[in-house]
Amino acid sequence: METKIYKEANLIEAIQVLKEGGLVAFPTETVYGLGADALKKEASKKIYEAKGRPSDNPLIVHIAREEDLSRIAKNISLDAQKLMKAFWPGPLTLIFKKQDIVPYETTGGLDTVAVRMPNHKLALRLIEESGLFLAAPSANTSGRPSPTCAAHVLEDLSGKIDGVLDGGEVNLGLESTIVDVSSKEAVILRPGFITKEMLEKVIGNVQLDPTLLEGAKENMKPKAPGMKYKHYAPKGNLTIVMGETSQVVNKINTLLLSSPKDKVAVIATEETKDLYQCNQVRVIGTRKDEATIAAHLYRILRELDELGVEIIYSEGFSESGLGFAIMNRLVKAAGHQIIYA
Ligand code: TXA
Ligand code: MG
């Protein structure tokens, strides 16, 4: 099939495709999502096929108006209502008990449903004007970095989906924070832009899924099925070097001495980019603003794949605030290979 590129001016065409059960990728503030009618099981099945996604990995349902929530979710707690008020529209996904109309094909066989209201004008228009609930996982092939622009979507899914709504680069670049509010205690299943501290300011104590903590055992099972799969792994062998910045730079330079010059790259920051003896230095962002680092991580991983380097060294980042989400993705991309300088 030919994958069409839609602009805001052709929104009607994209909506028509979705109404007929087709797949259209669209921008959100976090990453591009691969959209389909969440209440049509055949449409959800197509998402899994196009992405090569394991069928036990549930999809996030996107809504545009809070009053639609109770059609797909039940037992909406007071805490959940406070979180929605504070962070919707925005990069926060909430897990609720599902209503019967949500097919198990959309929830990966679970009795819960993940719901999010994206903070993106085009996404909200698409949902609202289609009148649909849009199931949308990140619009990448399973195992590849999530797409932060329409070109990334096409790289992975061209010929496999009906279309992509091009809304330019996304703002945040990391997937939403996922919080389970389906039982008494709120639990973070995936870290993101909305941090534990931000959530706790609104509802008090929030737990972290134990598998997110350092020292988590290999055999522990994360509550978000998607978190167990190998993710974001670049083709080159990625190692993270942690420590005080000047020592990190020294350590990476030492490692570079014993690496073949044309096959190695460094992921650096604005502050350190000129300090490496390496031909391929990629600037991920500035340490003065962690959001810049989050915004460029996936693009850089894709670029390094295209470059075909075999060895990648990346500076590590502090795990406080947004750094927790950044390191969650980076450590996975590195298959947990970390050196302390
Ligand atoms: O920012 C985002 O969340 C993006 C944009 C497109 O909205 N979407 C996204 O979707 O990252 P995806 O499919 O790549 O990740 C969804 C995650 C998976 O880890 C999945 O296992 C988890 O959410 N999930 C979905 N429904 C769940 C449920 N009922 N219980 C537990 N985890 C769930
Ligand atoms: Mg994903």
Image (cartoon, rainbow, N blue to C red):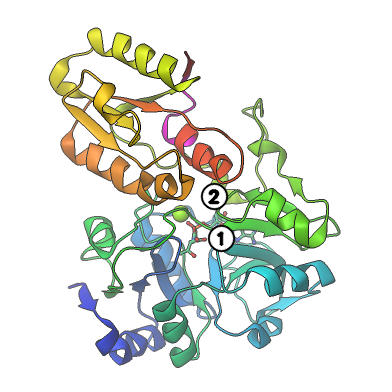
Residue that badge 1 annotates? 58
| Marking on residue 197 | none
User: Residue 3's quadrant in the figure?
Assistant: bottom left
Which image quarter: residue 12? bottom left
The answer to whether 242 is drawn above or below residue 255 in the figure is below
Q: Earlier in the sequence, mark 1 or mark 2?
A: 1
Residue 288 vs residue 204, the one in the foreground: 288
Give the number of callouts: 2
Q: Which residue is labeled 2 in the image? A: 226
Q: Which residues are magenta?
A: 332-338
Which amino acid lies under the numbered mark 2 shown in the image of this protein? Gly
Give the x, y percent position of residue 324.
58, 40
Q: Position of residue 101 (x, y in %)?
A: 64, 82
Residue at left 67%, top 81%?
69
The one of 228 and 184 positioned closer to us in this rendering = 184
What residue is shown at x 34% (from left), y 56% (from top)?
A: 147
Q: Residues within 10 Å of mark 1 (few under 14, many from 20)?
A: many
Does the image show residue 317? yes
Where is residue 323 shown, x and y percent of the image?
54, 40
Q: In the rendered view, would you say 201 is above or below 214?
A: below
**Is the CB of the residue bearing disc 2 within 8 angstroms of ligand 1?**
yes
**Residue drawn at 45 percent across, 74 percent down:** 120
Q: Residue at x 28, y 33 (%)?
A: 235
Could you tell me residue 42's position as x and y percent?
A: 45, 76
Q: Taking 273 as reference, is 79 above or below it?
A: below
- The amino acid beneath tag 1 is Pro
For the residue with label 1, is its CB less than 8 Å from the closest atom of ligand 1?
yes
Circle 1/circle 2 CB separation < 8 Å = yes
Q: Is disc 1 placed on a helix, strand or loop? A: loop
For marks 1 and 2, give the CA distance.
8 Å
Q: Quadrant of the N terminus?
A: bottom left
